[in-house]
């Protein structure tokens, strides 16, 4: 099987072998109508469909994926993404902050970080239709849209909006 995506390709074995004289290179299938030819061609067709389904799933979940991610998905190899995600980082930050309430942070500050997390989650869901985004997807436009979202959809006043953005920027900088 050879997969080409974004100008790169990868290949791997489907663990089937075919006599070279029966292989149609142009069509990418076995020649003939024998049961053997039909079985191999059906297997190839279903393998292509599975790869395409993994492609669609990766595309829906994540704007940033590679041909290696697609190959791993087809082969059933789980690999945790090495790239950090916004909500994951935010949640970890808030969990680490909790024991420091009344030591380094006031309960009100902790509550503001929890609210900022909920606003961030709802913004990502509302704007991108996803549960989380990669940190690398953050840009100036994201921050401008987040500010507008807080002021319009969430009806936050300017001071609250700026505090939530300040909380968010602390998370994005870690």
Image (tube, rainbow, N blue to C red):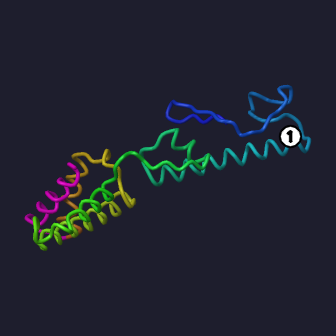
Residue 156 lies, in percent from the top left, at: 15, 69
Whether residue 173 is in magenta: the answer is: yes
The residue depicted at 16 percent of the width and 62 percent of the height is 164
Residue 7 lies, in percent from the top left, at: 51, 30
Against 68, residue 108 (above or below) is below
- Side of 162 relative to 137 (left or right): left
Q: Main secondary structure of the magenta part?
A: helix
Whether residue 153 is in magenta: the answer is: no
- Side of 21 relative to 172 (left or right): right
The residue depicted at 54 percent of the width and 51 percent of the height is 56
Q: In which quadrant of the rendered image does the N terminus lie?
A: top right
The residue depicted at 22 percent of the width and 50 percent of the height is 174
Q: Quick one: 89 or 117, which is closer to the camera?
A: 89
Magenta stretch bounds: 155-174
Q: Quick one: 116 or 26, which is closer to the camera?
A: 116
Of all residues, the one furthest to the top in this rendering is 21
Mark 1 highlights which residue?
Answer: 37
The residue depicted at 38 percent of the width and 61 percent of the height is 131
Residue 94 lies, in percent from the top left, at: 24, 64
Crowd tier of the residue under label 1, counting other residues whose Cα lies within 10 Å: few below 14, some 14–19, many 20 or above: some
Res 150 → quadrant: bottom left
């Amino acid at each position: 099987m050879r997969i080409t995506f974004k100008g790169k390709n990868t290949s791997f074995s489907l663990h089937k072998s075919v006599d070279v004289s029966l292989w149609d290179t142009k069509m990418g299938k076995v020649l003939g109508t024998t049961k053997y030819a039909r079985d191999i061609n059906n297997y190839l067709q279903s393998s292509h469909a599975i790869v395409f389904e993994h492609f669609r799933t990766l595309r829906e979940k994540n704007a940033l994926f590679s041909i290696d991610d697609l190959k791993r998905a087809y082969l059933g190899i789980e690999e945790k993404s090495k790239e950090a995600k916004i909500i994951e980082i935010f949640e970890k930050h808030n969990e680490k902050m909790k024991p420091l309430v009344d030591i380094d942070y006031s309960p009100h500050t902790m509550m503001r970080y929890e609210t900022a997390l909920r606003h961030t989650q709802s913004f990502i869901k509302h704007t991108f239709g996803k549960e989380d985004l990669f940190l690398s997807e953050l840009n100036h436009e994201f921050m401008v849209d987040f500010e507008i979202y807080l002021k319009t959809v969430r009806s936050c006043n300017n001071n609250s909006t700026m505090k939530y953005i300040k909380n968010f920027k602390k998370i994005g900088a870690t």
